[in-house]
Structures are given as structure tokens and as C-alpha cells.
Amino acid sequence: MGILFGGKSAEHEVSLQSAKNVIAALDKDKYESVLIGIDKTGRWYLGKNLEDLAVALDGSKAGLGRLLEIIEEKKIEVVFPILHGPYGEDGTIQGLLKLANIPFVGAGVLGSAMGMDKEVAKRLLRDADIPIAKFKVFLKSERKKINYEKIVKEFGLPLFVKPANLGSSVGVNKIKNRQDFVKAVKEAFLFDRKILVEKAVESREIECSVLGNEYPLASLPGEVIPARGFYDYEAKYLDKRTVLQIPAKLPKKIIRKVQKLALKTYKVLCCEGMARVDMFLQKDGEVLINEINTIPGFTNISMYPKLWEISGLCCAELLDKLIKLAFQRFQDEQKLRTSR
Ligand SMILES: Nc1ncnc2c1ncn2[C@@H]1O[C@H](COP(=O)(O)OP(=O)(O)O)[C@@H](O)[C@H]1O
Ligand SMILES: [Mg+2]
């Protein structure tokens, strides 16, 4: 099995942590892991261990073609892309693996691309009558048209400013005044050519893990309680005071609502294999969808595997299921007719 990790993304470091955990949890009797690292410039490496990312197999050949060669040489039967963010979670790698005719874990090209782009995902959810926070979208070319007063009049304060395609809260800011807004817009545009400005939702943050292809299952939900402010990068990976309440303390009725909404979101966004659906639970019991993560974190503090664990599926079993789902989708696709 090929493990793809690292990646040309601001979430590179998170991916290394996720990959480490996946490799450790895999049933060694069943799977032999071949580590394929991608550095921050997008070059490919074959590594013996994770720290080995710097050891190039053949510097001059470390381009894209190298991946396909490795797959053939090592007789890799399935690939697990543990890449977060652009160039990994956004359909690009998925397209490559699809063309290479190799089964892979997680959403396909369309689901990955739609889940990554927060604007596209929100539009589809809205179309399916799934509640979301109010948002506006701006391209870099429309920068001059961004009117702070107009947005505040419509959405109130505070606001959230974020890049359209990223994760791990990189480039995400909560702002309460014009000066911070200008700074936040500038920062978000460093990471993407498209940004979102959202109405801040006052709520609890609930996450639900989903697993499956045509017949997905939802885990028990969990809750994220950041020590201060919002669930930013610090709170996610550095601040030990952030509490992950697993499972979330919720009435049965809300749990069912959350699970139902997670499954609906998963289907609307064409997900396969796995995804973590993140939501906002408001005081009045209303649940809004914040976003979907088609390659959720697998770090040792990550919610996705932890939620399955308390739902009765340990990490090795979860990985087993994900690999089976990858083969299943591949076989289903192979059965399709390619001529009349
Ligand atoms: N509209 C919003 N209302 C309230 N909190 C938000 C909103 N948007 C984002 N946040 C906060 O910022 C965090 C990161 O934003 P999110 O859209 O999930 O980006 P990422 O893909 O980087 O995780 C969320 O977990 C939440 O704490
Ligand atoms: Mg998030």
C-alpha cells in the first residue's frame, strides 16, 4: 500500500503527523506500507521512514512521473493519500491516481474538489436546503470592491475572513473592526485567489465522522471546545487547553439531527470513503454546516479516528474498512461499460 504524505500545502506539517499515526495503526500482517513523500515544492520522494522525506531516490527524476514508477516498481495495489489542503485533498492527486488506474482511499475527483472549495460546497449545501452561515465571496481581482461597511451592515460583527481553499484554520481570522478586517483580507489572499467573508455564528462546534460509499454511516458526534477565541491553528495543534469532548454531551434528539445532517452533507457533496463534517450548534438547537473535510486529520489528537473509536471501531479496523471501500469503488467503476 502506498502512503502519500507531506504535500505542497500550508498543511504539510499536519500531514506528516497524520501519516505517522496511520502507519503506526496499520495491521502490519496485512499491509506493507510504501512511504511516498511530497515536499513543499511538489517533488516526490520514496522514503523508508517519515523523517526521511529529505532523501530523494533520484533527484533528477523526482518529478510527477516518479510516483507512477514507484507504484509499478513496488507493485502498490492501493494508495492512501494522507494529504491535507490543496494539491492533495482537492481532487488533483485523486485525478492522477484515477488516470493511473489505481484504487485509492477517500473521495474521488469531484467530491474532493467540491469539499475543498468552501464557496462551491456552500452553494451546493444551500441548494439542498442544508443550513449554512451567510457568506460573501471575493476574488483577488475584485479586491477593490470589498466594502467593509456594507458587509457589516448586512452581517453585523464579528466577521470571519478565510481563504476559500485551505484547512487547519490557516489564514482564517475573526475580526471585530475595520483595521483587522483589512489585515485579515490581505492575509487570506496570501493563501488563495478567492476568499470568503462570513457572518460569525455563535455556537458550539460539533464534528461528526462519516464512513462509507453508497451507504455511509455517521459516528457519534464530538465537540471542540477551544480554550480561547475560536478554533484557530494554535488551538488545533498547539494549545493543550483545547478540549475535545468525545462523545459530545448532547441530547439524543440533537445527536440524531447532527448525524442525519452529516450524512446528507456527505451525499450532497459526493463523498466516498470518509469525511468529517463540521457543524455549528446554536443555542436554539439549530445546526448549521460549517465545512466538510474529505481527508480529515489522523494526528493523535484528531477527531475523525477518535469518534470511530468510541463508536466501536478501532483505528486498525477503520483503516481496514477504508481500504476495502477503496477497492469496492474501484471494482464498481471497472464494471461500467466503456462501449455501447
Ligand atoms: N462563520 C463562522 N462562525 C463562527 N466561527 C467560525 C466561522 N467560520 C469559521 N469559524 C471558526 O474558525 C475555525 C476554522 O474555520 P473553517 O472554516 O473550519 O476553516 P478550516 O478549513 O481552516 O478548518 C472554525 O473551526 C471555527 O472555530
Ligand atoms: Mg474547519
Image: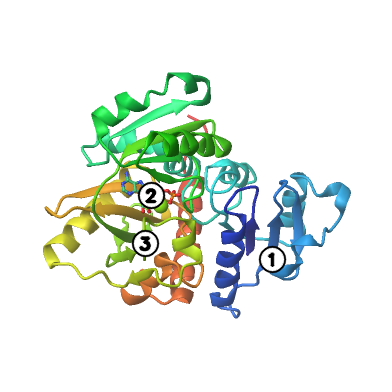
Three-letter code for the amino acid on which mark 2 is drawn: Ile
Among the 4 quarters of the image, the one containing residue 6: bottom right
Q: Is mark 3 within 8 Å of ligand 1?
A: no
* Residue indicated by mark 3: 228
Q: Nearer the viewer, mark 3 or mark 1?
A: 3
Could you say which disc has been placed on residue 162 in the image? none
Secondary structure type for disc 1: strand
Secondary structure type for disc 3: loop
Q: Do residues under tags 1 and 2 come within 8 Å of each other at their CB atoms?
A: no
Residue 135 x, y percent position in the rendering: 32, 34
Mark 3 or 1 closer to N-term? 1
Q: Residues within 10 Å of mark 1 (few under 14, many from 20)?
A: many
- Residue 78 visible somewhere in the drawing: no
Quadrant of the rendering where the N terminus is positioned: bottom right
Three-letter code for the amino acid on which mark 1 is drawn: Val
* Residue indicated by mark 1: 34
- Alpha-carbon distance for marks 1 and 2? 28 Å
Residue 161 x, y percent position in the rendering: 41, 39
Among the 4 quarters of the image, the one containing residue 149: top left
Secondary structure type for disc 2: strand
Report the residue that reaches farthest toward the bottom.
29
Q: Residues within 10 Å of mark 2 (few under 14, many from 20)?
A: many
* Residue indicated by mark 2: 292
Three-letter code for the amino acid on which mark 3 is drawn: Arg
- Alpha-carbon distance for marks 2 and 3? 23 Å
Residue at 42% across, 77% down: 314
- Residue 29 visible somewhere in the drawing: yes
